[in-house]
Image: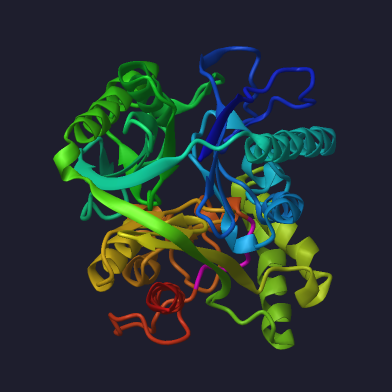
């Protein structure tokens, strides 16, 4: 194993833009203040078969086009695309990366010049991450054994419907083969990284605080991997001091688990990897020319109904412009990468996008093959993937934010995720009155694809 950490906290220069991502509204830019440094970290594992690479980074999201560019540059270094995995921490106190999803014009009203600067910053970001991977691959390997255990802690709540609160803390440790000394700690949790709240300070939020705590106490590098946090928020109040409060709680739980060696089971190789993508359908089939024309007319009409400059007005403007180019100009589905790494004693399942907690619960309950670590915000983040019942509920749950609609499930709701991520309609749910996710709906496709990967 080889590991390397890069402090990539943006500064001008070389970063052309210091616009920040994570909160909608007025443009939010950093002016040099840093709460906790932003990290990109790489873990390289040679299992005797091939080189496996895990890249995690303190950023709110990675759009599809950025993910694909990074992957195209990393793949030649390792040979098999399934052997490369990338996870965003989802801190809302990092740079705005990419110019597509979320849409910087809809989200913050950025000008064309600002968006060009964001694009240039994205190029710097991509270059730094790819260089980090190359450097870590080139490092000498330390022979290690791997071990897995789970702790639990509650530092968040369910903001969508108040039900499931994820408390599992996955912990994998690497120990030097020659003397069993600790070499690295990989850990996870599922909770939005928004403990700091909305300000103009770069900060890795509670994951960064937890990482600092673990490294300070155990003396080895620590690596945080985000879970199915789409409906999980950190405990209030969201303010700068809460970053250390919650981060230390999480870090202390990881430390307690690591120190209790009796909890761990050995993880063995080789690592068998798989990568696939599934297209999640929207509630309206915009591949149908008649449906596309109807949706375009609806958005054209909405431009006159929303207050000028509002989220809804800007979204309707963008949708109308995209639909002028027909189905090639507007998304007709949400592509979702899903990745599996199977080891002896542990399987890692990495899901793209802002996946809600019911997916982690269902997958862990259904999988009978041993320990399962569910990660999210994996490879790319282009929107929310809600459970079927949330998609059906619309505006009756958390103002429809995670569902993507408010009072009409065939059109994006103003101020919901489909507005900010520039989608023309929410994801497809089961018909009214049908509680289970039926074939052809978003939840059914995700669960089916995941279980096929897990059982293959």
Please give the range of residues in magenta.
422-427
Q: Is residue 36 left or right of residue 206?
A: right
Please tell me whether residue 424 belongs to the stretch shown in magenta.
Answer: yes
Task: Give the residue at x 32% y 22%.
Answer: 218
Q: Is residue 382 visible?
A: no
Please tell me whether residue 388 belongs to the stretch shown in magenta.
Answer: no
Q: Nearer the viewer, residue 98 or 288?
A: 98
Q: Where residue 31 appears, x then y in whole percent?
A: 65, 14
- Above or below, 247 against 109 in this view is above
Q: Nearer the viewer, residue 288 or 192?
A: 192
Name the image quarter holding the C terminus: bottom left
Query: Hey, which residue is sitting farthest front in the picture?
Result: 178
In the picture, residue 240 is in which quadrant?
top left
Q: Where residue 65 appears, x then y in whole percent?
A: 72, 54
Q: Where residue 85 appears, x then y in whole percent?
A: 56, 53
Q: Nearer the viewer, residue 342 or 435?
A: 342
In the picture, residue 435 is in which quadrant?
bottom left
Q: Where residue 254 appears, x then y in whole percent?
A: 26, 33
């Amino acid at each position: 194993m080889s590991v390397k950490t890069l402090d990539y906290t943006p500064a001008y220069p070389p970063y052309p833009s210091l616009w920040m991502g994570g909160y909608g509204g007025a443009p939010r830019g950093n002016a040099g203040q840093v709460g906790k440094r932003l990290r990109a970290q790489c873990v390289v594992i040679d299992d005797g078969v091939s080189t496996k690479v895990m890249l995690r980074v303190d950023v709110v999201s990675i759009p599809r086009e950025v993910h694909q560019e990074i992957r195209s540059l990393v793949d030649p270094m390792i040979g098999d695309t399934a052997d490369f995995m990338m996870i965003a921490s989802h801190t809302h106190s990092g740079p705005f990366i990419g110019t597509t999803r979320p849409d910087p014009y809809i989200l913050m009203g950025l000008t064309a010049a600002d968006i060009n600067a964001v694009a240039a910053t994205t190029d710097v970001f991509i270059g730094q991450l790819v260089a980090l991977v190359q450097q870590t691959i080139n490092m000498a390997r330390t022979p290690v054994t791997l071990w897995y255990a789970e702790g639990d802690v509650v530092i968040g709540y369910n903001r969508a419907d108040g039900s499931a609160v994820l408390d599992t803390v996955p912990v994998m440790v690497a120990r030097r083969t020659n003397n069993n000394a600790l070499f690295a700690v990989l850990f996870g949790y599922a909770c939005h990284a928004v403990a700091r709240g909305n300000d103009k300070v770069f900060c890795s939020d509670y994951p960064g605080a937890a990482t600092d705590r673990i490294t300070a106490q155990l003396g080895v590098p620590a690596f945080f991997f985000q879970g199915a946090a789409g409906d999980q928020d950190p405990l209030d109040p969201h303010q700068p001091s809460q970053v250390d409060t919650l981060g230390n709680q999480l870090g202390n739980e990881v430390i307690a688990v690591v120190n209790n060696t009796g909890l761990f089971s050995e993880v063995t190789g080789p690592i068998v990897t798989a990568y696939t993508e599934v297209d999640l359908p929207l509630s309206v089939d915009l591949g149908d020319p008649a449906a596309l024309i109807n949706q375009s007319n609806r958005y054209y009409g909405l431009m006159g109904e929303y207050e000028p400059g509002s989220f809804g007005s800007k979204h309707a403007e963008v949708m109308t412009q995209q639909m002028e180019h027909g189905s090639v100009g507007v998304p007709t589905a949400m592509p979702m990468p899903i990745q599996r790494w199977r080891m002896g004693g542990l399987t890692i399942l990495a899901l793209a996008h802002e996946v809600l907690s019911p997916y982690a619960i269902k997958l862990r309950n259904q999988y009978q093959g041993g320990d399962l670590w569910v990660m999210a915000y994996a490879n790319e983040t282009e929107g929310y993937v809600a459970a079927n019942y949330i998609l059906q509920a619309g505006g009756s749950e958390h103002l429809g934010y995670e569902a993507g609609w408010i009072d009409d499930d065939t059109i994006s709701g103003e101020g919901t995720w489909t507005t900010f991520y520039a989608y023309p309609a929410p994801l497809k749910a089961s018909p009214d009155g049908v509680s289970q996710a039926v074939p052809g709906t978003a939840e059914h496709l995700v669960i089916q694809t995941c279980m096929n990967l897990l059982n293959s």
